[in-house]
Amino acid sequence: MKQYFNLGEVFGYFFRSKDADRPTNFNLKSMHFINKLSMLMFLIGLTVLMYRLFIR
C-alpha cells in the first residue's frame, strides 16, 4: 500500500536540477511547463476533492 502513495517522483520532477547535457529548445521547454502545470492542477483538484469528502 505504501508504494501507491509514494510521491517522491512527482516532487523530484518539480525540483530537479538542470542537466547540462540535455538539449533545450522552445518545444521541449513548453512541453515540460505544460506537464508541470497539469500535474499541479491535478494535485490541487485532488486536494479539493479530499477536503470536500472529509470536511463536509
Image: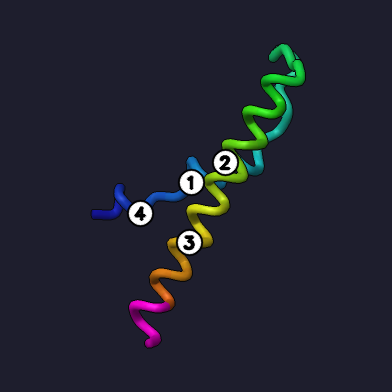
Residue 34 quadrant: top right
Q: Amino acid at mark 2?
A: Gly
Image mark count: 4
Q: Which portion, as a residue range, is magenta?
A: 52-56
State left or right for residue 17 relative to residue 35.
Answer: right
Q: Main secondary structure of the magenta part?
A: helix
Q: Amino acid at mark 1?
A: Gly
The circle on residue 8 is 1
Q: Amino acid at mark 4?
A: Phe
- Depth check: 45 or 13 in front? 45
Of the numbered discs 4 and 2, the one sitting upstream in the chain is: 4
Residue holding disc 4: 5
The circle on residue 51 is none
Residue 43 pos. (x, y %):
50, 56
Distance of label 3 from label 2 (alpha carbons): 20 Å
Q: Quadrant of the C terminus?
A: bottom left
**Dot 1: what SS?**
helix
Q: Are marks 1 and 2 in contact (CB under 8 Å)?
A: yes
Residue 55 forms part of the magenta stretch: yes
Neighbours of disc 3 within 10 Å: few (<14), some (14-19), many (20+): few
**Dot 2: what SS?**
helix
The residue located at (51%, 44%) in the rendering is 10
